[in-house]
Image: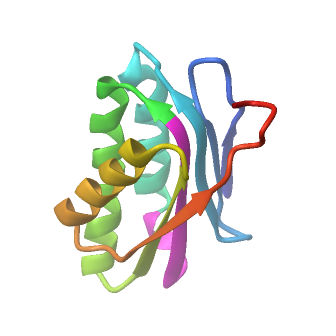
């Protein structure tokens, strides 16, 4: 399985991992209530494809919002990526946050303190029609 793509819904983020293109992205809202049902296949895919992951990956988190249940699964993904880094893979995280949402930036900073992975924090503006 070279890629996994799960379309975003009202409650779940888009998941797009592609080994050939070296794309690893989680984008949208994650307010799923059955987090194991949603995130277990994602973690399983990462573990199954561990030997096929290139020596350098940039993992993108572009989340508008996530609930406490999802936050734990995001941390599991980060722990897994930290393990990959310890095995010699150059892992970097790009953490997008809305410039109007300091909380999402702070959450990313908290995660960065919990794992040994470089984080790049990227502020993005929200289109004025949304505000």
Q: Is residue 12 left or right of residue 40?
A: right
Q: Is residue 21 left or right of residue 62?
A: right
Q: Nearer the viewer, residue 65 or 76?
A: 65
State the image coordinates of residue 89 (x, y, percent, origin top left).
Answer: 40, 82
Say if residue 53 shows up in the picture: no
Q: Is residue 76 above or below residue 8?
A: below
Q: Nearer the viewer, residue 41 or 109?
A: 109
* Residue furthest right in the image: 129
Count numbered badges in the picture: 0
Q: Is residue 52 above or below residue 48?
A: below
Q: Quadrant of residue 34?
A: top left
Residue 107 counted in the magenta span:
no
Which residue is painted at 35% across and 64% down in the image? 81
Which residue is painted at 40% across and 13% down in the image? 33
User: Where is the C terminus found, in terms of image quarters?
Assistant: top right
Which residue is painted at 24% across and 55% down in the image? 110
State the image coordinates of residue 114 (x, y, percent, origin top left).
Answer: 18, 60
State the image coordinates of residue 1 (x, y, percent, origin top left).
Answer: 64, 52
Magenta-highlighted stretch: main secondary structure? strand
Say if residue 62 shows up in the picture: yes
Q: Which residues are magenta?
A: 50-64
Q: Nearer the viewer, residue 39 or 51?
A: 39
Q: Nearer the viewer, residue 8 or 129?
A: 129
State the image coordinates of residue 108 (x, y, percent, origin top left).
Answer: 35, 55
Q: Is residue 29 left or right of residue 84?
A: right
Q: Is residue 76 left or right of residue 66?
A: left
């Amino acid at each position: 399985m070279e890629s996994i793509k799960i379309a975003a819904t009202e409650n779940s983020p888009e998941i797009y991992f592609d080994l050939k293109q070296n794309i690893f992205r989680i984008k949208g809202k994650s307010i799923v209530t059955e987090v194991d049902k949603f995130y277990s296949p994602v973690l399983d895919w990462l573990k199954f494809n561990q030997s096929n992951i290139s020596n350098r990956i940039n993992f993108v988190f572009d989340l508008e919002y996530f609930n406490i249940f999802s936050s734990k699964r995001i941390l599991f993904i980060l722990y897994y990526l930290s393990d990959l880094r310890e095995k010699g893979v150059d892992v970097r995280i790009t953490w997008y946050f809305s410039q109007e949402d300091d909380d999402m930036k702070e959450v990313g900073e908290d995660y960065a303190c919990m794992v040994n992975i470089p984080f790049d924090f990227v502020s993005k503006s929200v289109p004025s029609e949304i505000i």
